[in-house]
């Protein structure tokens, strides 16, 4: 209930943004943040809670985008293409999960990386379907009944509506029995199996849900941009997504979301911080990949719990004792 209330309060705050600013560029940037939030909601469930690493989430993102883009440019209504995009991405997650059930750690990472590279090559080479390196254009905006989401404000509200639904879905999974099963599986697969957790079923479910959410984000991205190309679905994106989860803290949804906002806004820092010297902004953008890599290394070395873990430790030091003399552990809502 508390998580639902927090998400509802945050949703109201986000929905108020278009009424506070009319800056079209800022709304577009925040729409990109919302798209990444949808992907991270699913990836945090897969990696942060279930402990199943994926370096192929850019592929699921691309599958959703291309499926919906190809179908709508071919005359399909948006609603049908939307469902197809999510379903095909989820099916991709199922097809990847089944042969990867026995893989762990680096082996699973390599399997998902290989899947991502295969899909990238498909996006490039299937020119008759995807347009190849020239991309797929003329994708119509999302449309419900007679209303087209063509303006930055409309797209912002649409994307964040689905971001709120994605967070609500994942938060409910985490707070109920499936979430406990995933955490047990993350800690020890043998221990979880001994407690009656069906590892095959849980792994398949979490892969399908995570892939489906990435596909959902891809659908919204395609219709928001109106144009997609393989360069948007590379290994770089997959690594960036994993960095967001690790930086935020494994098993911390709030931490992952905070990291998502920070890292997504980095390339647009000039729009977010008025008055920032142009040279500083350009330097940050030029060294974007270096900053991501250095951040990941530093977090793994000095903050293994990520941002959420650091805040939790800080809270313990600032408020070490409760009124009754017992140590108060500031919960990271990291769940």
Image (tube, rainbow, N blue to C red):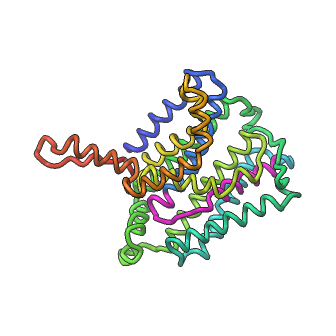
Q: Residue at x 43, y 43 (%)?
A: 4
Q: Nearer the viewer, residue 225 or 177?
A: 225
Q: Position of residue 28 (x, y in %)?
A: 65, 33
Residue displayed at 63% across by 53% down = 237
Residue segment shown in magenta: 45-72
- At a point 49% along the width and 51% down the height, the residue shown is 294
For the residue pair 227 and 207, the one nearer the viewer reads as 227
In the image, 190 versus 289, the foreground residue is 289
- Give yes or no for residue 52 being in the magenta stretch: yes
Q: Residue 84 falls in which quadrant of the image?
A: bottom right
Judged by its main secondary structure, the magenta piece is helix
Q: Residue furthest right?
A: 128
Task: Specify whether 25 is left or right of 104.
Answer: right
- Tell me if 20 is positioned left or right of 195 in this view: right
In which quadrant of the rendered image does the N terminus lie? top left
Q: How many marks?
A: 0
Q: Is residue 161 visible?
A: no
Residue 167: percent from left, percent from top: 50, 47
Quarter of the image holding residue 87? bottom right
Q: Is residue 274 magenta?
A: no
Q: Is residue 313 visible?
A: yes
* Residue at the spot 56% in from the left edge and 49% down from the top edge: 290
- The residue lying furthest to the left in this view is 325
Horizontally, is 156 left or right of 11 in the view?
A: right
Q: Position of residue 112 (x, y in %)?
A: 61, 67
Q: Position of residue 92 (x, y in %)?
A: 67, 64
Please tell me whether residue 118 is drawn above or below residue 68 in the rendered image.
below
Q: Is residue 279 above or below residue 320?
A: above
Q: Nearer the viewer, residue 240 or 37?
A: 240
């Amino acid at each position: 209930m508390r998580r639902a209330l927090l998400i509802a309060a945050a949703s109201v705050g986000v929905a108020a943004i278009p009424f506070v600013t009319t800056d079209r560029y800022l709304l577009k940037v925040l729409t990109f943040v919302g798209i990444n939030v949808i992907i991270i909601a699913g990836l945090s469930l897969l990696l942060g809670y279930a402990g199943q690493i994926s370096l192929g989430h850019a592929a699921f993102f691309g599958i959703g985008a291309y499926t919906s883009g190809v179908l709508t440019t071919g005359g399909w209504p948006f609603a049908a293409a939307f469902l197809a995009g999510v379903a095909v991405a989820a099916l991709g997650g199922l097809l990847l999960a089944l042969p990867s059930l026995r893989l762990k750690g680096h082996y699973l990472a390599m399997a998902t990386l290989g899947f991502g590279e295969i899909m990238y090559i498909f996006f490039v080479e299937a020119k008759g379907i995807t347009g190849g390196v020239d991309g797929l254009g003329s994708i119509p905006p999302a449309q419900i009944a007679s209303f087209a989401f063509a303006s930055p404000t409309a797209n912002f509200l649409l994307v964040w509506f689905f971001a709120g639904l994605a967070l609500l879905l994942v938060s409910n999974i985490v707070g109920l029995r499936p979430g406990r099963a995933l955490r047990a599986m993350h800690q020890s697969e043998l221990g979880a199996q001994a407690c009656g957790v069906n590892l095959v079923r849980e792994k398949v479910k979490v892969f399908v849900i995570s892939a489906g959410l990435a596909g959902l984000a891809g659908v919204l991205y395609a219709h928001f941009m109106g144009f997609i190309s393989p360069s948007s679905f590379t290994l770089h994106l997959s690594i960036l997504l994993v960095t967001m989860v690790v930086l935020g803290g494994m098993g911390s949804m709030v931490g992952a979301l905070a990291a998502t906002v920070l890292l997504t806004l980095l390339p647009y820092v000039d729009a977010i911080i008025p008055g920032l010297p142009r040279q500083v902004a350009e330097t940050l953008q030029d060294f974007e990949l270096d900053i991501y890599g250095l951040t990941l290394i530093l977090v793994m070395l000095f903050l293994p719990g990520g941002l959420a873990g650091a805040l939790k430790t800080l809270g313990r030091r600032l408020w070490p004792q409760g009124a009754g003399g017992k140590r108060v552990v500031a919960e990271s809502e990291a769940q």
